[in-house]
């Protein structure tokens, strides 16, 4: 009888966690990020028979999320053409699934109920998670696949784990980091097993079937993308590496800042909190991770993932877009909360006050959740007037929407719009786009990197690109062209400023809309 009530209680808790994740995201509503619109345009063009392209006739892989693109395209075919709303629902369901999986995994590993519930709630209300779910990005979906894959592996379902990891890679290529950890553990585990068996039988126990499952799911995309685009690797990766000029160690610094404030504590405790937060959370994470590995050896890749993720991105040193910060978080949360529980209960046991340790853990988890909730606003100063994370900022997207509405009535057939941020403009104008960064315009890549003297921030639009390609319109933040295009006499002769939208984003003196004199 008691066991039955316990099972029903767990199902009820899981349903409650899923409900919280759904409600938080659906109440906030779409606050769609520029990059999501790039994926949406690929999806729309595919659904309308134009091919998997951004600009019709130009076979360039500018999206990093083929599986998510196909999902959005399917929604369009089925008549669901508000892709921001579709993405919101898909992402809300994905995050609800992740919250439940984290709760279930924590219970499976014999963590306390407060840790399991706290873990599920931490993901359900995490501002970082919610921001990109309502932002239309694929982040929620890839994290669901990652957590599900590692969870399946921990519970002995290696074939399912491999299949889910393949789906993660098809959703975002940086999931290859997790795939390498998973396969590495699968390969090394039988080789280092100390059971006295000779090497040959151990070689037969290598994960040949799992690798076949992974390869079978990835191979069709690799073959198609190589034949269609020339490579399965997104062109945007190389374009960003050339166009953005990043100071050494910038990625490492940003990632360490992130690790020091997983629950947005700096908004409560001030800007010096990271000095305390980084060593504190890393110690808790490592102690919790060691405890988890002792409970289940297959937790090793799960525990290592955040550390390896940070290492890989730090070495590559790309411009860290905000959604790059989300994938390690659920894994990091688990290590921190388990470490916190073990530390507090262990200390209380040593003092002979074991009940105090339980209550201290509960209080600490509640305080962390309240810290995360403190990063929300009930009435955002832009976009829908609904509760949302403060970081769910999309003023730039709203500005580009205004620019698109100004330019679209002026467009003539085959007029090309150039821009440094192309998502909103491309979606709402449907015009041919010259991407000044080069994500979907390979012809732009050779114009970078620019002389650093031309930059105000990490990126500036190449003047030679605009002079050579002569787009009919250029829509840009002033900071992108202050030192590169605006001082050029030829640009002033060939282009006229037709509108200026007030903004100081990135230190700009407005958003500028230029038209080439016909």
Image (tube, rainbow, N blue to C red):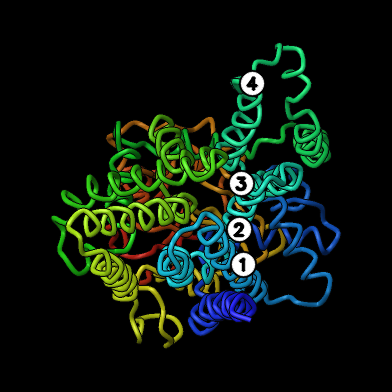
Residue 240, placed above or below residue 494: above
From the viewer's side, name the closer residue of 261 and 397.
Answer: 261
From the viewer's side, name the closer residue of 137 and 449.
Answer: 137
Which numbered disc flags the more N-terminal residue, 3 or 2? 2
Question: Which one is closest to the eye, mark 4 or mark 1?
Answer: 4
Count residues near mark 1 (Cα–Cα under 10 Å), then give few for <14, some for 14-19, many for 20+. many
483 displayed left or right of 497: left
Q: Residue visible at 61% across and 24% down?
A: 188
Q: CA distance from mark 1 to mark 3?
A: 17 Å
Where does label 3 land, which residue?
154
Q: Residue visible at 52% across and 44% down?
A: 302
Question: Which one is closest to the eye, mark 1 or mark 3?
Answer: 3
From the viewer's side, name the closer residue of 314 and 285.
Answer: 285
- Residue 330, position as x, y percentages in the image: 47, 56
Count residues near mark 2 (Cα–Cα under 10 Å), then give few for <14, some for 14-19, many for 20+. many
Question: Which one is closest to the eye, mark 4 or mark 2?
Answer: 4
Q: Residue furthest right?
A: 49
Contact between labelled residues 1 and 4, with CB atoms less than 8 Å apart? no
Q: Which mark is residue 195?
A: 4
From the viewer's side, name the closer residue of 360 and 455.
Answer: 360
Contact between labelled residues 2 and 4, with CB atoms less than 8 Å apart? no
Where does label 1 land, which residue?
97
Q: Which mark is residue 144?
A: 2
- Residue 178, position as x, y percentages in the image: 57, 40
Which numbered disc flags the more N-terminal residue, 1 or 3? 1
Residue 349, placed above or below residue 126: above
């Amino acid at each position: 009888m008691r066991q039955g009530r316990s099972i029903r209680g767990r199902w009820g808790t899981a349903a409650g966690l899923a409900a919280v994740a759904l409600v938080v995201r659906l109440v906030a509503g779409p606050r769609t990020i520029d990059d999501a619109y790039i994926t949406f345009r690929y999806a729309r063009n595919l659904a309308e028979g134009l091919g998997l392209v951004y600009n019709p006739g130009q076979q360039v892989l500018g999206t990093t999320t083929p599986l998510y693109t196909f999902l959005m395209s399917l929604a369009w075919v089925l008549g669901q053409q508000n892709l921001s709303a579709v993405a919101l629902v898909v992402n809300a369901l994905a995050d609800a699934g992740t919250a439940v999986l984290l709760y279930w995994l924590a219970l499976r590993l014999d963590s306390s109920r407060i840790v399991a519930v706290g873990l599920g709630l931490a993901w359900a209300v995490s501002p970082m998670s919610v921001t990109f779910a309502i932002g239309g990005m694929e982040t929620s979906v890839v994290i669901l696949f990652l957590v599900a894959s590692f969870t399946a592996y921990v519970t002995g379902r290696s074939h399912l784990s491999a299949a889910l990891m393949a789906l993660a890679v098809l959703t975002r290529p940086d999931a290859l980091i997790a795939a390498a950890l998973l396969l590495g553990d699968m390969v090394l585990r039988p080789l280092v097993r100390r059971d006295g068996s000779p090497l040959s039988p151990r070689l037969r126990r290598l994960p040949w079937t799992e690798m076949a499952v992974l390869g079978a799911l990835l191979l069709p995309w690799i073959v198609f993308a190589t034949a269609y685009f020339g490579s399965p690797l997104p062109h945007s990766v190389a374009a960003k590496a050339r166009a953005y000029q990043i100071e050494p160690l910038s990625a490492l610094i940003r990632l360490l800042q992130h690790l020091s404030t997983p629950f947005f504590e700096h908004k409560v405790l001030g800007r010096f909190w990271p000095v305390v937060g980084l060593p504190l959370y890393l110690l808790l994470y490592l102690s919790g991770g060691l405890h988890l590995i002792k409970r289940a050896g297959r937790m090793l890749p799960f525990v290592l993932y955040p550390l390896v993720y940070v290492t890989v991105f730090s070495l590559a040193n790309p411009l860290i877009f905000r959604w790059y910060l989300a994938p390690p978080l659920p894994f990091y949360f688990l290590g921190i909360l388990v470490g916190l529980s073990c530390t507090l209960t262990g200390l209380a046991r040593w003092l002979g006050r074991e009940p105090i340790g339980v209550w201290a853990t509960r209080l600490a988890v509640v305080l962390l959740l309240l810290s995360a909730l403190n990063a929300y606003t009930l009435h955002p100063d832009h976009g829908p007037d609904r509760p949302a994370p403060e970081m769910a900022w999309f003023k730039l997207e709203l500005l580009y929407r205004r620019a698109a509405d100004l330019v679209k009535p002026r467009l003539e057939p085959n007029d090309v719009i150039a821009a440094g941020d192309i998502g909103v403009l491309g979606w709402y104008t449907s015009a041919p786009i010259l991407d000044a960064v080069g994500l979907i315009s390979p012809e732009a890549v050779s114009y970078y990197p620019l002389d650093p003297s031309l930059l105000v921030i990490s990126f500036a639009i190449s003047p030679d690109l605009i002079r050579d390609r002569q787009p009919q319109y250029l829509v840009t933040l002033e900071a992108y062209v202050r030192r590169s295009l605006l001082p050029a006499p030829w640009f002033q002769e060939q282009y006229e400023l037709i509108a200026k939208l007030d903004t100081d984003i990135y230190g700009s003196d407005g958003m500028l809309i230029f038209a080439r004199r016909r």
